Image: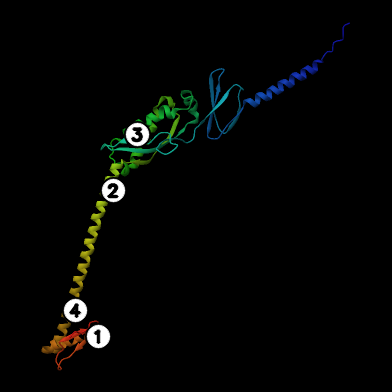
């Protein structure tokens, strides 16, 4: 006996289909939603068509196909460092001066990326390794060329001149590099430190110590001369004073001036604490200061 067949209403089937489509659409939107942070440029990579699109300049939100991916490239300040400090991209750069001194230069190269040209830059460097594969080698060659005509002392005295020359040449070279596609802009070069050979530093320290000794000896001689001149000048002034006193006594006492001059000198001695001894009413012939003891 045949059982009756239950028929599903067509409306119910449409509802189920719409629910499935809606869920799938929400899921697709969820997978396709992307955001680009500030200071980043986004590039949409399509593995199906093997194409690239963009850039999308952040901050931004958008939708893509679920199978597509987003690659971001920072376009504000980027750094390439050469130093012996921890975390540097490369070791300090070795330079030969014009007088054949091998010095180590610690440096920083700052640059920005033109966000409108980042797509072509990414096409040439899909792993974003332009610093390691190209920029580093160009920088080495320019720094070596621009520093070879300076002496080791000029690395300090002409530091700004050297840095400016290198910076200008780096910008010119990066602009001319075809693989950069004109995307590298606002290049800045900073010479952080220059390390000289230990032997050279030791010789400089010896020279500085010797020069300091010469200066010290010269200052001591000058001080001795000044003291000697001051003593001589004081004696001259004292002698001139005595001569003027004698002339005054001569004018006032005539031929008796030696006696009066002697008396005035004895008074000075007595005022300073000396003892004047008179013998038989004559001019004293012994003067004993108070801080001495007469021995018989």
Q: Is residue 128 above or below residue 268?
A: above
Task: Where is residue 265? Give x, y as percent.
Answer: 19, 84
Residue 208 horizontal/vertical position (percent)? 27, 50
User: Mark 2 or mark 1, which is nearer the start of the sequence?
Assistant: 2
How far, Cα to Cα, is label 3 from label 1? 84 Å
Residue 56 picture quarter = top right
Spot the residue most to the bottom.
280
- What is the residue that sits farthest to the front in this orientation? 296
For mark 2, what is the residue? 205
Pick out the residue farthest to the top: 1
Q: Earlier in the sequence, mark 4 or mark 1?
A: 4
Earlier residue among tags 4 and 3: 3
For the residue carrying disc 4, how many other residues have a C-alpha within 10 Å: few (<14), some (14-19), or many (20+)? few
Distance between the alpha carbons at the discs numbered 2 and 4: 54 Å
Please say if 18 is above or below 276: above
| Residue underneath mark 4 | 241
Q: Answer yes or no: is residue 153 visible.
A: no
Kindly state the secondary structure of the residue where label 2 is placed: helix
Q: Nearer the viewer, mark 3 or mark 1?
A: 1
Q: Residues within 10 Å of mark 3 (few under 14, many from 20)?
A: many
Could you say which is closer to the camera, residue 211 or residue 41? 211
Q: Secondary structure at mark 1?
A: helix
Query: What residue does disc 1 label?
Result: 271
Mark earlier in primary sequence (3, 2):
3
The numbered mark at residue 143 is 3
């Amino acid at each position: 006996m045949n059982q009756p067949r239950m028929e599903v209403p067509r409306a119910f089937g449409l509802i189920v289909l719409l629910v499935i489509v809606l869920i799938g659409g929400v899921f697709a939107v969820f997978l396709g939603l992307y955001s680009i942070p500030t200071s980043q440029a986004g590039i949409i990579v399509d593995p199906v068509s093997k194409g690239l699109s963009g850039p999308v300049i952040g901050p931004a939100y958008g939708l893509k196909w679920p199978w597509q991916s987003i690659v971001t490239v920072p376009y504000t300040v980027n750094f390439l460092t050469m130093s012996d400090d921890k975390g540097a991209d490369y070791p300090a750069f070795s330079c030969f001066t014009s007088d054949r001194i091998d010095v180590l230069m610690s440096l920083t190269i700052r640059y920005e990326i033109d966000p409108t040209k980042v797509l072509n830059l990414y096409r040439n460097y899909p792993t974003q390794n332009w610093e390691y594969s190209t920029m580093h080698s160009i920088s080495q060659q320019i720094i070596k060329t621009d520093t070879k005509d300076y002496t080791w002392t000029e690395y300090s005295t002409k530091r700004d001149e050297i840095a400016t020359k290198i910076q200008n040449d780096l910008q010119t070279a990066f602009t001319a590099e075809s693989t950069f596609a004109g995307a590298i802009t606002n290049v800045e070069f900073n010479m952080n430190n220059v390390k000289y050979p230990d032997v050279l530093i030791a010789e400089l320290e010896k020279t500085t110590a010797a020069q300091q000794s010469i200066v010290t000896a010269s200052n001591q001689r000058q001080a001795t001369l000044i003291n000697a001149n001051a003593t001589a000048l004081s004696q001259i002034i004292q002698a001139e004073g005595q001569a003027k006193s004698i002339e005054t006594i001569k004018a006032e006492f005539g031929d008796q001036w030696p006696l009066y001059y002697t008396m005035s000198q004895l008074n000075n001695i007595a005022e300073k604490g000396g003892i004047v001894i008179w013998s038989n009413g004559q001019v004293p012939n012994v003067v004993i200061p108070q801080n001495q003891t007469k021995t018989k």
